[in-house]
Image (cartoon, rainbow, N blue to C red):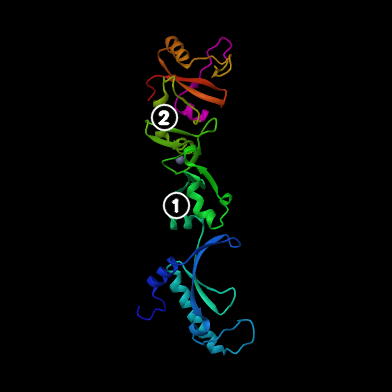
């Protein structure tokens, strides 16, 4: 260990103390500090272009190359590498690059990245540090945290102000996205238990196939055998009352249990239907 080139702790500290800049061309953030001239650093003490005839002997070039490879390997351990100066190519720098996620962690910004690549922020202040560096925040998909919920299992962000957000709270405690519920039979059962014979809750995220797997049939109790459809909302004709619908259904057939399913929703109202299954199915 004694014959390493770098004191990596020191290098790391130097990097951390360097100015953070955003390179628009490369679309990355970086911290860089001046290591020295290659004329002092490389074993040959010479600068050369590998593809040009130069004053470097083959032996020197080989040694330089070996040394360079060793330096890069050591720096790689702390996620850094050597870059050369733009003004003077004999200048050598040690550089660490960060993508957007890396820089969020580095600056300890109050920005949460969700599994569907949505970055949730509490306020515009949270992204100030990035825009100050010249970063265009439109490069990432940002949302305000109060407009989203985050699935507790897969960490996906779900926009809650859509008409039918694909998520549900189970057992009044666990918030899950539709995908996590649809792929887990136990969660489906828990969700169904939550909404059964409950006029205040409806489901929108289980497919018809899943509902049928749990023994449910769509209610089609009118004289023509049509699927029962209801509407509640702002318009005058949307006067269906889930509490009454449920009371009627139970009084007509107390041996069944019922759930409401939202089939469509918009800012003016909700369309829903009712499913039933025989009690004590399981
Ligand atoms: Zn999920």
Residue hosting label 1: 109
> Image quarter for residue 12?
bottom left
Which residue is nearer to you in this view: 27 or 53? 27
Which residue is nearer to you in this view: 83 or 20? 20
Q: Which tag is nearer the camera, tag 1 or tag 2?
A: 1
- The residue at the point 52 percent across, 43 percent down is 143
Residue hosting label 2: 191
Q: Residues within 10 Å of mark 1 (few under 14, many from 20)?
A: some
Q: Between marks 1 and 2, how big is the CA–CA gap? A: 35 Å
- Whether residue 220 appears in magenta in the rendering, the answer is yes
Q: Which numbered disc covers residue 97?
A: none
Rendered-image quadrant of the N terminus? bottom left
Location of residue 76 in the rendering, given as x and y in whole percent from the top left corner: 45, 69
Q: Residues within 10 Å of mark 2 (few under 14, many from 20)?
A: many
- The residue at the point 44 percent across, 21 percent down is 200
Location of residue 191 in the rendering, given as x and y in whole percent from the top left corner: 41, 29
Mark 1 touching mark 2, by CB under 8 A?
A: no
> Image quarter for residue 247?
top left
Magenta-tinted stretch: 207-225
Which residue is nearer to you in this view: 211 or 70? 70
The yes-or-no answer for disc 2 within 8 Å of ligand 1 is: no
Rendered-image quadrant of the C terminus? top left
User: Which label's residue is closer to the chain start, 1 or 2?
Assistant: 1
User: Which residue is farthest right?
Assistant: 52
- Whether residue 228 appears in magenta in the rendering, the answer is no
- The residue at the point 48 percent across, 57 percent down is 103
Q: Secondary structure at mark 2?
A: helix
């Amino acid at each position: 260990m004694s014959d390493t080139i770098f004191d990596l702790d020191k290098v790391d500290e130097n990097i951390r103390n360097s100015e953070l800049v955003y390179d628009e061309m490369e679309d990355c953030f970086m911290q860089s500090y001046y290591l020295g001239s290659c004329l002092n650093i490389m074993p040959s003490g010479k600068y050369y272009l590998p593809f040009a005839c130069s004053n470097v002997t083959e032996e020197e070039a080989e040694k330089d190359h070996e040394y360079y490879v060793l330096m890069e390997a050591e720096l790689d351990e702390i996620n850094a590498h050597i870059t050369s100066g733009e003004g003077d190519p004999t200048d050598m720098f040690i550089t660490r690059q960060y993508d957007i996620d890396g820089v969020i962690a580095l600056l300890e910004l109050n920005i949460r990245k969700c599994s569907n690549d949505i970055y949730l922020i509490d306020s515009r202040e949270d992204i100030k540090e990035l825009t100050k560096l010249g970063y265009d925040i439109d490069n990432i998909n940002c949302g305000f945290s109060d407009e989203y919920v985050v699935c507790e299992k897969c960490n996906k962000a779900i926009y809650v102000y859509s008409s039918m957000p694909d998520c549900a709270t189970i057992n009044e405690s666990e918030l899950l996205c539709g995908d996590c519920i649809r792929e887990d039979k136990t969660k489906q059962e828990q969700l169904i238990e939550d909404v059964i014979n409950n006029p205040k809750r409806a489901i929108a995220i289980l497919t018809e196939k899943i509902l049928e797997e749990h023994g449910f049939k769509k209610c089609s109790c009118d004289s023509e055998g049509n699927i029962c459809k209801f509407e509640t909302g702002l318009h005058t004709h949307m006067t269906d009352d889930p509490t009454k619908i449920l009371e009627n259904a139970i009084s007509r057939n107390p041996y069944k249990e019922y759930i409401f399913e939202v089939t469509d929703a918009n800012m003016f109202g909700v369309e829903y239907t009712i499913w039933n299954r025989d009690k004590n199915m399981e």
